[in-house]
């Protein structure tokens, strides 16, 4: 039987119960790639018929992690942002996402200076991981859809985004989803 959402969630629970460190999260990342290889799951969750928007596929009341489907219609380019004290794993379902990872090099003043450290494309079936405090920006075309696993509900924690032109640091509001 194909690896499905229930199996993925059960694996996430088992893994994160014993290891919440970056190593445990890396195991979750590779399981997410396995889930994305399930064509029926991708078609049902992220296919052309799926309603657009953000869908919570699963939230763990115990451990706090969430599995979210980002059913995007229109292209979007995000500013650099973090995921606060959480981590996030992005698994591409359809089309692609161009990722840039950034490092803050100003020492934490009111005006941030960011340096690009890595740039790559996530293609369908590939998942990337962003550990707590990591800064990234994303850029995807129309119809790019992905499954995201976060360590907690990001709407409930402080997060920031950066204005590359001015260096200004802004608090993110809930639903500035990604
Ligand atoms: Fe993000």
Image (cartoon, rainbow, N blue to C red):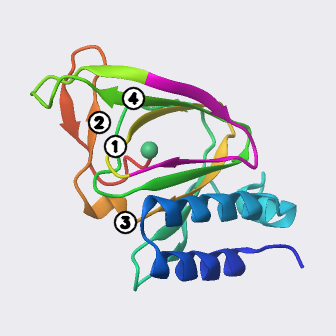
Going by the picture, which residue comes out furthest to the bottom? Answer: 62
Residue drawn at the location 57% of the way across and 75% of the way down: 12
Look at the image and give the residue range highlighted in magenta.
117-131
Percent across and percent down for residue 29 are 61, 58
- Dot 2 falls on a residue whose secondary structure is strand
Separation of marks 4 and 3 at Cα, in angstroms = 23 Å
> Is residue 164 positioned above or below 87 on the image?
above
Say if mark 1 contacts mark 2, CB within 8 Å: yes
Query: Does the numbered disc 1 mark a residue whose Cβ is under 8 Å from ligand 1?
Result: yes
Q: CA distance from mark 1 to mark 3?
A: 14 Å
Residue carrying label 3: 153
Q: Residues within 10 Å of mark 1 (few under 14, many from 20)?
A: many
Magenta run includes residue 127: yes
Q: Residues within 10 Å of mark 4 (few under 14, many from 20)?
A: many
Q: Circle 4 is placed at which residue position?
A: 102
Q: Identify which residue, 156 or 88, lies in the foreground.
A: 88
For residue 161, the mark is: 2
What x and y, as percent, mark residue 78? 44, 32
Q: Does the numbered disc 3 mark a residue whose Cβ is under 8 Å from ligand 1?
A: no
């Amino acid at each position: 039987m194909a690896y499905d959402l229930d199996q993925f969630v059960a694996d996430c629970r088992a893994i994160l119960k014993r290891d919440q460190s970056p190593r445990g999260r890396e195991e979750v990342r590779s399981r997410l790639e396995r889930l994305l290889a399930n064509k029926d799951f991708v078609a049902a969750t992220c296919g052309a018929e799926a309603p657009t928007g953000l869908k919570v596929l699963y939230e763990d009341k115990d451990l706090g992690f969430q599995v979210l489907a980002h059913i995007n219609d229109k292209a979007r380019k995000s500013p650099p942002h973090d995921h606060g004290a959480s981590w996030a794993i992005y698994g591409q379902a359809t089309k692609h996402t161009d990722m840039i990872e950034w490092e803050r090099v100003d020492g934490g003043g009111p005006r941030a200076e960011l340096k690009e450290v890595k740039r790559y494309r996530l293609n369908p079936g590939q998942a990337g991981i962003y550990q707590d405090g990591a800064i990234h920006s994303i850029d995807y075309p129309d119809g790019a859809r992905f499954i995201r696993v976060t360590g907690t509900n990001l709407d409930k924690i402080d997060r920031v985004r950066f204005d590359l032109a001015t260096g200004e640091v802004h608090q993110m509001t809930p639903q500035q989803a990604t």
